[in-house]
């Protein structure tokens, strides 16, 4: 799957989601509604769904693949007398906290001519938390996950977005982000041992941890019926630091793209 195809598909589908409403009422200028006062028996608002994502086949790859990904979000949590986070408003706002997951498939050197001779890397699983704070037109966020399997250590990202809501059903976000990884993870995906150097012809390389990439991301979200959402997102990033200097990136691509499209549903629960 070529990079130009990924970019073309991402631009087309993001535009489709953003332009979804077609009636005159839908395209009128949207003004923020009055605050929504939800029933006092709502303790948790959670969003669950499933989508597909186009990503590089491995860290630094010039080729792409499609894989499934879960959509899990915690919009509101109220433990009476203990804490209250998030917002009951459909537009969100305030402090948010939720799970953050990641997955990187197995890297087998025999599948890629440019990696012939390198040791294989098993699939890596990531689990952690994402924190954010949202105002009316902007947000900041950060996520940290523990990685285990083929790559081990801590990974995550920090970023900020501007937010636009041209209609009551559409939410658009865009902004910069930076990703990071600890040394053990970076060694697994960007390092070349002395033995691998002899068998692959790539220079031996022992990277440190730190910031791994910087980039920009955009997302579009359309509530096509109450509590049902169509979600699209795309990103571009470029490796920095020790990751950028890796021989594995030299034979691959330092520019990385992703695109995702998914369907989700929001649930309101009374737990306490």
Image (cartoon, rainbow, N blue to C red):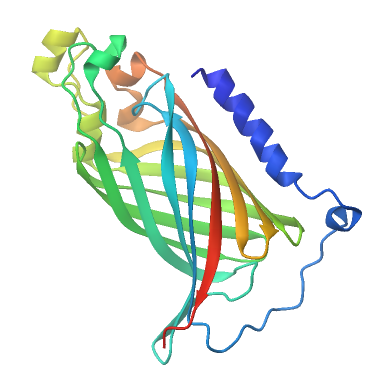
**Residue 17 percent location from the top left of the image:** 69, 44
| Residue at (46, 37) in percent of width and height | 214
- Please give left or right for residue 24 compared with residue 97 in the image: right
- Please give left or right for residue 8 compared with residue 238 in the image: right
- Please give left or right for residue 242 compared with residue 40 in the image: left
**Residue 111 percent location from the top left of the image:** 28, 16
Residue that protrudes farthest toward the bottom in the picture:
81
Q: Quadrant of residue 239?
A: top left
| Residue at (32, 29) in percent of width and height | 243
Considering depth in this image, is 85 or 124 the residue closer to the camera? 124
Q: Quadrant of residue 241?
A: top left
- Above or below: residue 99 compared with residue 123: below
**Residue 236 percent location from the top left of the image:** 52, 33
Considering depth in this image, is 64 or 142 the residue closer to the camera? 64
**Residue 96 percent location from the top left of the image:** 48, 68
| Residue at (59, 26) in percent of width and height | 7
Count of picture labels: 0
Residue that protrudes farthest toward the left in the picture:
195
- Above or below: residue 80 compared with residue 248: below
């Amino acid at each position: 799957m070529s990079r130009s195809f990924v970019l073309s598909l991402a631009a087309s589908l993001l535009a489709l989601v953003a332009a979804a409403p077609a009636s005159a009422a839908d395209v009128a200028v949207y003004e923020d509604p009055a605050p929504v006062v939800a029933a006092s028996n709502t303790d948790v608002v959670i969003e669950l769904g499933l989508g597909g994502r186009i990503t590089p086949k491995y860290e630094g790859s010039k080729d792409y693949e499609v894989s499934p990904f879960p959509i899990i979000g915690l919009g509101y949590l109220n433990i009476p007398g203990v804490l209250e986070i998030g917002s009951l408003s459909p537009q969100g706002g305030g402090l948010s906290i939720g799970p953050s997951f990641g997955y990187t498939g197995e890297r087998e050197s025999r599948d890629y001519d440019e990696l012939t001779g390198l040791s294989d890397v098993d699939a890596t699983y990531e689990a952690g938390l994402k924190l954010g704070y949202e105002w009316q037109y902007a947000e900041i966020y950060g996520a940290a996950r523990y990685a285990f399997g083929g790559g081990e250590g801590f990974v995550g990202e920090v970023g900020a977005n501007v937010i636009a809501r041209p209609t009551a059903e559409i939410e658009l976000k865009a902004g910069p982000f930076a990703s990071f990884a600890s040394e053990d993870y970076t060694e697994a995906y960007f390092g070349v041992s002395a033995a691998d150097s002899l068998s692959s012809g790539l220079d031996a390389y022992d990277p440190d941890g730190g910031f791994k990439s910087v980039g920009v991301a955009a997302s579009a979200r359309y509530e096509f019926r109450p509590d049902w959402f169509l979600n699209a997102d795309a990103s571009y990033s470029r490796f920095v630091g020790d990751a950028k200097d890796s021989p594995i990136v030299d034979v691959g691509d330092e520019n990385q793209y992703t695109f995702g499209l998914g369907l989700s549903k929001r649930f309101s629960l009374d737990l306490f």
